[in-house]
Amino acid sequence: MANKVLLINGPSQDPSDRFFGWPTPLLYAVAPSIAEAKKGKLDVEFISQIFDPIWYEAHSKSRIDRELEGIVDKEQPDIVCASAIYDSVYPTLCLFDKIKRINSDVKTIFGGPHFDEIHTLDKFSDIKLRPDLIDIAIAGDGDYALLETLRSIFNGRSLADVDWNDIDGRATIYTNDGSVYQTNGKPIDLNSLPFIPIEFANINRHKNDFGIFIDSDGKIIPTVQMIAQRGCPYTCNFCSESRNLAYPNARSINSLIEEIELRKQQGFGAVFFDDSTFGAHPQIRDLLVELGKTGMQFGSLNRFNLLTNPRKVEAYRSAGFTYVYTAIEQFDDSALKSMDKSQKEKTIKDSMSVLDNSGFDVGVSLLYGLPYETEETIEKTLDFTARWVDKGTIKIVSESVLSYHPGTLAGSGLTGGFHRTPPNSGYPFNRFEEGQWYHPEHVNAKYLEEILEISEKRFGRVMVRNKHSWHSVNGEVLVK
């Protein structure tokens, strides 16, 4: 009988969050293993649906625990693989604890995009503090590292006997006995990877994650996420996706078009490119031409400095792009320089004008809590944002607070871990992305409340945490 694997996408501790998305980090990590299992080359049965609760707090906790217990009792998994961002580390540990209490023989494998920020568990403080809950942790390129780990476990072979130098990718594998293994460090050929197995996700839920894509009847266009390039070539000093932490690695145009055509056949009408910086793809102009032939609608994460040329922005529009999400952070040259943002006020202003002229819907992120911010820089940021909201160009505003992440320059002095509930829970912290975690000393409730009061007056109607998404209408999240 095949060994069973349960997949878990770690739930958030933030019930006010309105940024929903497909569990792509987990799907990318398990794609090679699922493909091998389908071909009969890996004696594994993956339980058919990812356990993917949205948030884990208050009354939802007991419901999620009951659902998980029912799945474990019914399916009897041998291994549980979980992906977690920083905010979902503690809930994931709670779920591991629940599983281990039901069956202590279940092996747990932990990974995720924010675990990749740093390859030392002493600092990340998960497996070292709770070796009883995490058996194996994988940081970095999990694709082939996870496949080899599963193959070894089910063949009864020790990870110490694996020739990890034969495994492509930049991955580090940790075990609860203190052993550490590393793959060969060669960049993975992303074109050789199978497409993510979206059938393991809740398609009926996730196809509604992007309310920005609307058809002529006002209905959400079924949207899927894709990644054209991993990593980012920029070095913003607060970011966990900067070049020194996640090396850029691009897919070919043919690979991307092949996947888009598959998604079109599966009934999707829009694609959101969730790259750190979609516009940094090395073949971006040729890619846009080919995307335009698919007849799909597109959106992406991007940067203002890559969207200042009117002809280039019009090429995006001709390709089917209608939405771009990008970061203002703070509309001040001094602040932008201090954060190593590699753009200036003029860059942002010029790009916004070009995007407006091309008819784009724009989403922006604003960042507060910077050690070098002033009342003036915040006021300039709010004024600039409000002006473009009033013009109708900016449709979504996400306000964030600088949160220290392990491995980043800004977070180099971080001493606290994420194996706990948030240190700054509740209002007004929960009105900001990453607001509940670790910040500079000047950030307190009064400080954020004053910013929030102005924001609500100036552009509250487009603030992402005020939006009542498909998920809130369907009772999956709290409504303010």
Image (cartoon, rainbow, N blue to C red):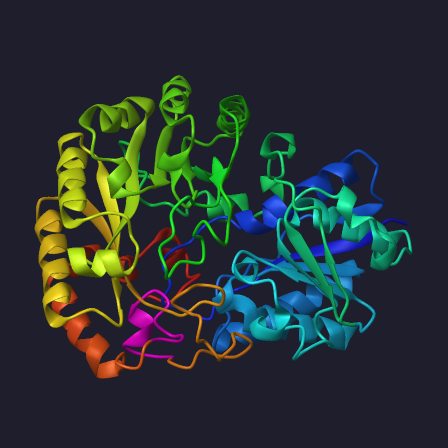
Q: Is residue 117 left or right of residue 137?
A: left
Closest to the observer, 442 or 105: 442
Query: Quarter of the image holding residue 161?
Result: bottom right
Closest to the observer, 356 or 9: 356
Q: Is residue 457 visible?
A: no
Residue 65 x %, y %:
62, 72
Reply above or below: 88 against 438: above
Query: Quarter of the image holding residue 408?
Result: bottom left
Task: Assign the magenta stretch its main secondary structure.
Answer: loop
Q: What residue is rendered at 48% in x and 80% in y?
A: 415
Q: Is residue 404 visible?
A: yes
Instruction: Look at the image and give the residue range highlighted in magenta.
Output: 425-439
Reply above or below: 258 against 61: above
User: Can residue 30 be found in the magenta stretch?
Assistant: no
Q: Is residue 367 left or right of residue 257?
A: left
Residue 158 x %, y %:
87, 58
Q: Is residue 40 left or right of residue 363?
A: right
